[in-house]
Amino acid sequence: MVQWTAEERAAIQGVFAKLDYESVGIESLTRCLVVYPWTQRYFGGFGNLYNAEAIMSNPKIAAHGIVVLQGLEKALKNMDNIKKTFTALSELHSEKLQVDPGNFQLLADCLTVVIARRMGTDFTPDIQAAWQKFISVVISALRRQYY
Ligand code: ZNH
């Protein structure tokens, strides 16, 4: 089982406390879809994703960005049991959505870039280390139902 120190818990809580879900959700999803364009294939039903401006002003992308961050918030609230918390979500991405699990890291990296930009010097190496650990536990939980 993953162990968290009090400092790590505080660091991750602190990152979430400053997150504006709407704007951070749009920006990280947009970056992912622009920087790694093959990830667009899973959003065929979302309409026009022609360029960054189109993606950023697409209401379905805006809504989905919030959904992803709410998913991460669920992990935050269940930090001692992330694997179990994400069983159904992992199954959904594997069996129904058939998202290549390598893409989880790509979206997570875009989210980290956005957070780093927003937090500036407040995103210290120690806070980043705790954040990366949290993200890697989330990703391993999301990959768990793949085979
Ligand atoms: Zn995902 C969905 C989360 C990644 C794609 N997602 C989803 C949801 C959630 C999530 C919560 C909802 C579910 C229900 O409804 O039940 N994701 C998430 C997270 C992550 C992710 C947390 C990491 C970090 N995804 C992802 C990626 C991709 C995706 C990477 C691709 C690329 N998702 C998706 C889709 C969907 C989802 C497509 C569906 C959408 C709609 O609306 O349809």
Image (cartoon, rainbow, N blue to C red):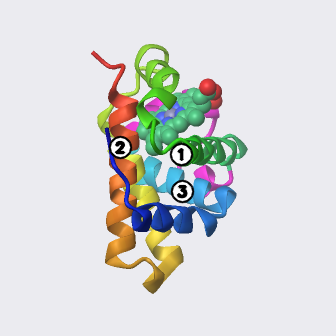
- Residue range of the region highlighted in magenta in the rendering: 38-57
Tell me which residue sits at (68%, 54%) in the image.
Answer: 57
Res 44 quadrant in image: top right
Q: How crowded is mark 2: few (under 14 residues within 10 Å), some or many (20 or more)?
A: some
Residue placed under numbered mark 1 in the picture: 72
Counting residues from the start of the chain, the first of labels 2 and 1 encountered is: 1
Give SS at disc 3: helix
Counting residues from the start of the chain, the first of labels 3 and 2 encountered is: 3
Check the image and report above or below for 121 versus 46: below
Give the residue type that dot 3 points to.
Ala
Residue 113, position as x, y percentages in the image = 41, 66
Tell me which residue sits at (66%, 63%) in the image.
Answer: 20
**For this rendering, which residue is in front, 135 or 104?**
135
Give SS at disc 2: helix
As for residue 7 lying within the magenta part, the answer is no
Give the residue type that dot 2 points to.
Val
Cα distance, mark 1 to mark 3? 24 Å
Q: Is residue 119 left or right of residue 108?
A: right
As for residue 43 lying within the magenta part, the answer is yes
Q: Tell whether circle 3 marks a residue whose Cβ is less than 8 angstroms from ligand 1.
A: no
Counting residues from the start of the chain, the first of labels 1 and 3 encountered is: 3
Res 8 quadrant in image: bottom left
Q: Main secondary structure of the magenta part?
A: helix
Check the image and report above or below for 78 versus 57: above
Q: Residue 52 carries which label?
A: 3
Residue 59, position as x, y percentages in the image = 72, 45
Q: Residue 137 carries which label?
A: 2
Tell me which residue sits at (39%, 71%) in the image.
Answer: 127
Q: Tell whether circle 1 marks a residue whose Cβ is less than 8 angstroms from ligand 1.
A: yes
Q: Residues within 10 Å of mark 1 (few under 14, many from 20)?
A: some
